[in-house]
Structure formats: structure tokens, C-alpha cells
Amino acid sequence: MLHAFAWTCVMPSEVKSRFLLLYGSQRGQAQSIAEEIADQAAEHGLVADLFCLTNKEKYNLEKETVPVVFVVSTTGDGEPPDTALSFVKTIKEKTLPRNHFARLNYAVLGLGDTNYANFCNCGKTIDGRLQELGAKHFYSTGHADDGVGLEIVVDPWIEGVWEALKKTVAEMATQGQQDTDSGRSLHNTDLSAASQESTGVSGLDVSLGLLKLKDSPAEASELPKSTSEVETRGTQPAPLEASLTQSLLPLSESALNVPALPPPFLRVSLEDAPAQELSGPVLQEHHQEVSISKAVQLTRDDSVKTAIMLELDISGKDIPYHPGDSFDVLCPNNSSEVQRILQRLRLEQQSHHHVQLELKKDTKKKAAQLPGHVPEGCTLLYLLTWCLEIRSVPKKAFLRALVECTEAAPEKRRLQELCSKQGSSDYNRFIRDTSVCLLDLLLAFPSCNPPLSLLVEHLPKLQPRSYSAASSSQRHPGKLHFVFNIVEFPACPERPAARRGLCTGWLSDLVSPVLQPCGTAQGPLAIIGGAAALPKVHVGLRTGSSFRLPSDPTLPVVMVGPGTGVAPFIGFLQQRYSLTSTLTHTHTHTHTHTH
């Protein structure tokens, strides 16, 4: 069991020492954790200079005189996130001398998922390369596994980093850098190994430090069992088993260590002003709209899973894909779930009002900024449909913020338990493992009524879904195939209604009128209205893939891909067939010409 760490009260006149905090994030998790670290720094007498790795003009690691903390995720087949690509490329340059980062004292928190290959590869790459270039650890590397829960490693990692930071800041301020480097050993034993021994999972995981709260007595980090919430619950019959809304002894009567209340930073207003209604996703430069020219169900109706192949018409589009590439599909949130959230928050009458965002002038959030994924002047309906990931599993910081928006004492206490250190097991069991989302919480805790600003602050950006190309452009010029299973999430006590995967369910509905059943002749879609009436999607090619066939077409290849994992190999086989046919034709033509 983890112990609550001590906190230091910093007097207003005290000068706080600084450290550099850099993050590389693809879907916002690494950024969110880095921001949490920055927000907590003041409680420990420190100031974090927080920057994304892509903002190279903001920092200079070669000359840095303070400790540096990296928080980085891994994406795709072990690749760095887009915001870290340039940084990783720079430090991997072979011309850099072995002492290039001899002045640097750093720590790395890597995020990954053991369900995928090359776990935490970006964090390991940065860590290893900095070591090769002379940099020194001041604190052990953490490897957080999203497959079992990031908080398993993230929480203790953050909890321990503060003393290491303060020690290193003091040493670097009073000693020569070279003396500091040679005289200091690792602060801790390898946390990843310690995590495996204590929890039986690979990698170390930590996200939100547990701080003593100073807002009011009810928000102390240790919430005593004598609070009014517990007294109120004590009048109710003891539940027979724990659930999302009920806890059992000893948790139900324990003092609680809860995270610090995240500082609010946005002011959101809704204006009933005439303006052009946005439609479709927020597009980036590489996103393009394409037509679905074929849709075929690959499995029979009595199969356990439903697999569908879609053919995209990319003729005339700048999508130069190769077998092994993947691409993003931009999809909206489920419309019925959006409507239920609007109804639950009593905002359905304002769904077409325009959202206005501004930063709170008195916010205490470090490096607060307006979310870039919310277009200026978009409607509330558009915000919830295309901008926010309403299906995301709420982090403990979000639960902590929801406590302040909940009126009923039993519900308030339960939310405190779920975000507390003592309630980590319940959080994993009833929220993370069951993929509970915002709507589930709003239905389970009816007295919780969060303002719209809280949703924009805590719900991450709606991310595109990635799929592998299942074709070769040499075999199918101007076409791009991909295959997917319709993901099914059966109902459970925490989620009373069954759900389908966000993108696979949407794609299935989109092509259902034109879906060709399994076993029928596969031809292009014939629709009244022609090509203009074909269903359309927005896609974007993901670059930088190293998943390729060997350049030698005669080299044997063994391919293993269970289920729809075979999809990229379809493209490989088509590519190999096309190359082999070309070589055979060329050889035959040359042999005939010689004779």
C-alpha cells in the first residue's frame, strides 16, 4: 500500500526553484499528466517551465542548468508521437559528440500499452539516447502501462519525484555541474522492477500525486470518516456488494487521501446569435474527404463477430499509401449519447447556441490556454459531436472536480472514494476496467451537475481512429481497402446499455443501406444519384511507418495476423504478387527477345 507523502507549505515571499517539464503527446494523455505535475509543483516550492517538445525555441537542453522532466507517450508501432518526432530525430543524429548532454540532469516518465508491440518505445529511445550523449538520471525512469492502468506507475512516480527534484535543484545551484554529475547516483532503485514485484504487472505507472488540500476543511487530503457524508451514509443499510455507486468496509469508513482540486481555467458561455453552422470534423491539412465505393460483409450473419471490408475511392486524391501503412478515419460521437448528455445537463434547448471560450484571468493553472480543438463560434451540439471525447474514461482529476458539482452527500462521498488513493482498486474495477464514461457517471450520480466549462477542461480531444491498409495500389489503382470488426461492448451494471465501438459502429450505420451481404458478387456500389450520393468519410494518411515488405521480392516472409490483424498482410500479398508478376513478365519478354 502506498503511503501519503509529505507536503511543504511555501510562504508567499519564498522564491521557488524552477525545473523544465517537457512532454510529447499524441492523444493528450502525456500532456495531461505533465500539466498535473506542473500544477502540483507549487505545493512543493517549485515552478515548472512547461513546454511541448515540438516548441524547440522555448528550451535549450545543451545549456540547461536545472533538472529536466520528460513525459512522453508512444504511438503506432512504437513510434514517437507527432509532437516528439522532430526532437527524437535531432537527438539521434550520429554526428553528436558523446558528451553533448553532459550538463543535463533528467528523468523520464514513458507511457505505453503492453497490448501493443514496442512498449514505451519512445520513452526508452529518448532515455537511452540521452544516456549515450552523457546525460545523467536524477530519478529513475517510469514505464506506465495503459493496458493495466497508467495510475499504477504514474501516481508513485510523481509522488517520489518531488524530493529528487528538490535535492537535484539544490545540488545544481551550489556545485559545479561536472561535480554534481560525477557525485550523484540514482535516487531510487528501478521503479519499473519495483512495480512488477509489488503488483505483478510490467512497467511503472503514476499519474496524479495526492496533495493535502487547503481550500477548506472538507477538502483536506485526509477526509475523516466522521464527515457528514459518512454520517449520512451510516443511516443507510450496508450494501451487500460494492458497485459504482456503493462501497464496502473498510473503504466506506476510511479517511481518504484525494487529489488536489484541479484549478479551473475556462469560462464558457452560450450565445443565441445567428452564425453559420459548422458541419463535419475539424480538418487538418492532410485530411481529405473520400467516397466509399464498395462495402462488403465478410462474415456470415451467424458469426461471432461481424467483419466488413470498405473500399475508398482515392482517385485524384493525394494519398500515396503503401502496404503496411495505416490511416486515420475521423468519426463523430454517437448522436444519441450526445443528446442524452444534453438532456441530462438540461442544455437540449441550447444545443444550437454558439460556444464562447475565454481564459479565467485569475486561474492558477500553469500554462493555461484555450483548447485548440474547439473551433471559434461552434455550436454546443458541434462541440459535443466533433470536438470532445465523451466516451473517454474519466481520470481521477475529473472525478475530483465532479465532487464539487455534486449535492447529495452519499454521491459526493462515493466520488471522493473513487478518486482517492484508498479507492484505487474500486476506481480500476468500476471505472477503468468497465470503460465507464461521462454519461455513465451522470446517470449513476443524479445530483452531479457539472458546468459546461468542466467538460471542456477535462474531456480530451476527440481522436481519429486508425486502420491498416488492406490493399496494394499496384493491384487496385485509385482504391484503398480496409477491414474492421464491429466492436461490441455488452451491457454491465456500470453501463446499463450495450454499446458498439465509436468508429466501427458509425461506419456500420453509414454503409448499412449499401452493404453487400457475405457471399454475393462483389461489385462497385450502384446508387441512385451516382458518385455524389455515395457515403463519404474524412481520412488522413499516417506517415513515418516502417512496417514494410523486404525490398528483395524473392525473400520468403512469414506473416502472423489473427482476425482482422491479417488486414495489412492482404496488401503485402497483393504487392508481392504484383512485383512477382512484373518480374516474371520482364524475364519472359527478355528471354523471347534474345532468341
Image (cartoon, helix red, strand yellow):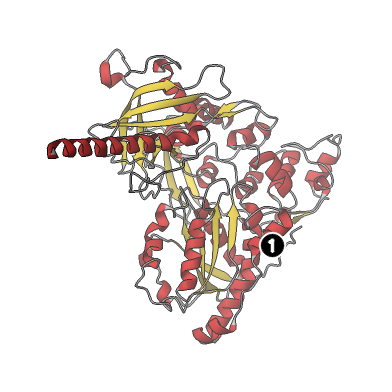
Of residues 76 and 242, the one nearer the viewer is 76
How many numbered circles are shown? Answer: 1
Q: Residue at x 78, y 41 (%)?
A: 247
Q: SS for tag 1? A: helix
Disc 1 target residue = 194
Q: Is residue 86 left or right of residue 50?
A: left
Of residues 100 and 296, the one nearer the viewer is 296
Give the amino acid at mark 1. Answer: Ala
Mark yes or no: residue 354 visible: no
Mark yes or no: residue 337 visible: yes
Q: Which quadrant of the figure has residue 317?
A: top left
- Residue 254: x, y in percent? 81, 51
User: Image quadrant for the C terminus?
Assistant: top left
- Residue 276: x, y in percent? 32, 31
Q: Residue at x 58, y 77 (%)?
A: 168
Of residues 286 and 55, the one nearer the viewer is 286
- Residue 542: x, y in percent? 37, 44
Few, some or many residues within 10 Å of mark 1 (<14, 14–19, 20+):
some
Q: Is residue 301 left or right of residue 376?
A: right
Q: Is residue 275 left or right of residue 235?
A: left
Measured along the vertical axis of the image, is residue 436 above or below residue 119? above
- Residue 240: x, y in percent? 84, 34
Measured along the vertical axis of the image, is residue 248 above or below residue 162? above
Q: Which residue reaches farthest front? A: 595
Q: Which residue reaches farthest top? A: 528
Measured along the vertical axis of the image, is residue 369 above or below residue 509? below
Measured along the vertical axis of the image, is residue 524 above or below residue 379? above
User: Image quadrant for the N terminus?
Assistant: bottom right
